[in-house]
Image (cartoon, rainbow, N blue to C red):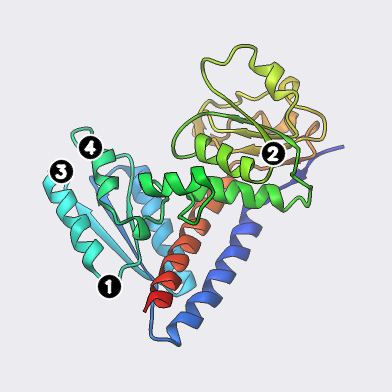
Amino acid sequence: MSAQILDGIVFSAEIKEDVKRRVAAMKEQGVIPGLAVILVGDDPASELYVRNKGKGCEETGMLSRTIRMNAAATQEELEAEIDRLNRDPAIHGILVQLPLPGHLDEAAALAKILPEKDVDGFHLINAGHLMTGTEGVTPCTPKGALYMIRSTGEDLSGKEAVVIGRSNIVGKPMAMLLLQQNCTVTLCHSRTKNLAEHTRRADILVAAVGKAGFVTADMVKEGAIVIDVGINRVDGKVCGDVDFEKVKEKAGWITPVPGGVGRMTIAMLLSNTADAAERTLKRE
């Protein structure tokens, strides 16, 4: 029997509707949530992501600003722009579109963003909140993936969860979120020995390695929840880290690529921005 599809298009629409409602309520109190995106250079993939973020803001009634900087911009110029946005009361969320040109220091730039305006959840203070289970900003992609996992209605407490990939953006925060759901979590990576022995035990399997078709059916437990975070291009087509056609015959639930976790990332970015604006309103 084929797996149930966890449809990111449907779930992201749910989240956007909720954000739209929250934005309308804030507007009645005189606050319009604002998101600013800094784009350095003209990378085509980054251009597409930025356009989609702007579209999401428009759909939910939020203020959207895109600050375009030349690919030759200096670190000082980039950080000065971040400082300006930190001081701008109309901006509740700041996002530096990654990757940056090679001569720029990404970590230093991200550290310049005020933690309360860091809607990507990459600031070290927000990473610390996630580690300790205290209130902070959760990275968008893992947050979206967890929403999809919870949508299955399964009791996650005590479940075996395996995350393949240990990036600061997806793998590590995903492991922390699953741990907070009382899962028993194994974090695997390129140095993991006998990887399939770990993945076959997983009730929840999250693939975030950036290798097309890396997770095959023989690596998956019958009835597992399989979350594919990968976005790869093969022969002009977009595909994930999971061999979707074969794994869907074995899994209980699975996310497609495209139309899966990627859709959730922007939806959660909008949600995080609304959260930031609500916190500002509460303080005022």
Badge 2, how many Cα within 10 Å: few under 14, some, many 20+? many
Give the number of the disc on residue 75.
3
Residues at marks 3 and 4, CA–CA distance in whole angstroms: 7 Å
| Helix, strand or loop at mark 4 | loop
Mark sitting earlier along the chain (1/3): 3
First of labels 1, 4 by sequence position:
1
Give the side of residue 69 with respect to residue 202, left or right: left
Above or below residue 156? Residue 113 is below
Of the residues tagged 2 and 4, which is closer to the observer?
2
Location of the N terminus by quadrant is: top right
- The numbered mark at residue 183 is 2
**Placement of 97 over or under 242, stated as above or below:** below
- Which secondary structure, mark 1? loop
Q: Earlier in the sequence, mark 3 or mark 4?
A: 3
Indicate which disc, 2 or 3, sits on the residue closer to the N terminus: 3
- Residue 6, x across and y down, in percent: 70, 48
Mark 3: secondary structure = helix
Q: Is residue 9 left or right of residue 28?
A: right
Disc 1 from disc 3: Cα separation: 24 Å
The one of 148 and 237 positioned closer to us in this rendering: 148
At label 1, counting other C-alpha atoms closer than 10 Å, the crowd grade (few under 14, some 14-19, many 20 or more) is: few
Residue 64 in view of the camera: yes
The residue located at (27%, 54%) in the rendering is 38
Mark 1 or 2 closer to N-term?
Answer: 1
Residues at badges 3 and 4 in contact (C-beta under 8 Å)? yes
Residue highlighted by disc 1 = 89
Q: Is residue 216 above or below residue 265?
A: above
